[in-house]
Image (cartoon, grey):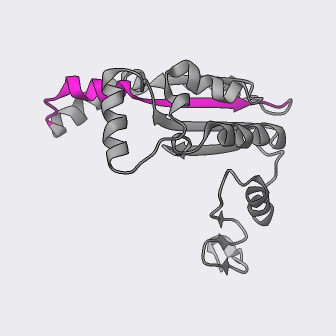
Amino acid sequence: MASGGEEEGEIRLSRTDLHSTRYHLVAADFVNLTELEDKLTQSEVDYNCPTLVLAECVLVYVDPAKVGRMLGWMSEKFSSLTFINYEQLNMEDRFGQVMLDNLMSRGCLLAGVSACTDKKTQEERFISHGWDSATCWNMNEVYSLLPQSEVQRVEDIERLDEKELLRQLFHHYGLTVARKNSANFNFDSVNFE
């Protein structure tokens, strides 16, 4: 029995998935839309329920055409959806090129780096595939929005002495928030700033 007197019910496990009455953890190749839809069906996803997708340095590894098909499928399938994507940004300057060279020397091919040229390309990858809006901030902008008392407290603990290097690194990562709205739920009404 769970707290509050509720029964948890059956828990199903496989090599890659876990399903219970209130939680589903699944592994799927997100560019294989048939497999992705099957996994979401097994997880009893309600496409009419406002949904949040989080991704961290994932899309940059995948061919932009495949990512585009997945983003288009999501914008058609879900009635209300927000996608928060943390990823590389501003990859065409010298610092970005050094980052790319370093990753490539380690065997990491960034097939989707063309969408990481700047904030506009990050936003356009969503807008061009049926999303209502997208906004991208580099991490310097995000950092400046944090409560400055907390920033100072953490910087005092960390004794950060390479602030210029941190600023350069933050300039090369971004947070993109893309929204697909419905008549019942408008993500644009949520203030992400």
Q: Identify the residue at horizontal 33%, vertical 37% (top origin).
A: 101
Determine the residue positioned at 71% across, 78% down: 7
* Residue 60 located within the stretch drawn in magenta: no
- Say left or right for 24 vs 153: right
**Relative to residue 24, is residue 50 depicted above or below?**
above
In screen coordinates, is 34 left or right of 4? Answer: right
Q: Is residue 149 visible?
A: no
Quarter of the image with the N terminus is bottom right
Q: Residue at 56% of width from left, 29% of height from top?
A: 115
Q: Is residue 155 left or right of residue 8?
A: left
Residue 51: image quadrant is: top right
Q: Nearer the viewer, residue 136 or 151?
A: 136
How many marks overall? 0
Q: Residue 164: where, in percent of width, then height? A: 21, 22
Instruction: Estimate the x, y position of residue 155 in percent, counting from the top left.
Output: 21, 32
> In this image, 105 relative to 37: left or right?
left
Residues in magenta? 159-182
Magenta span contains residue 178: yes
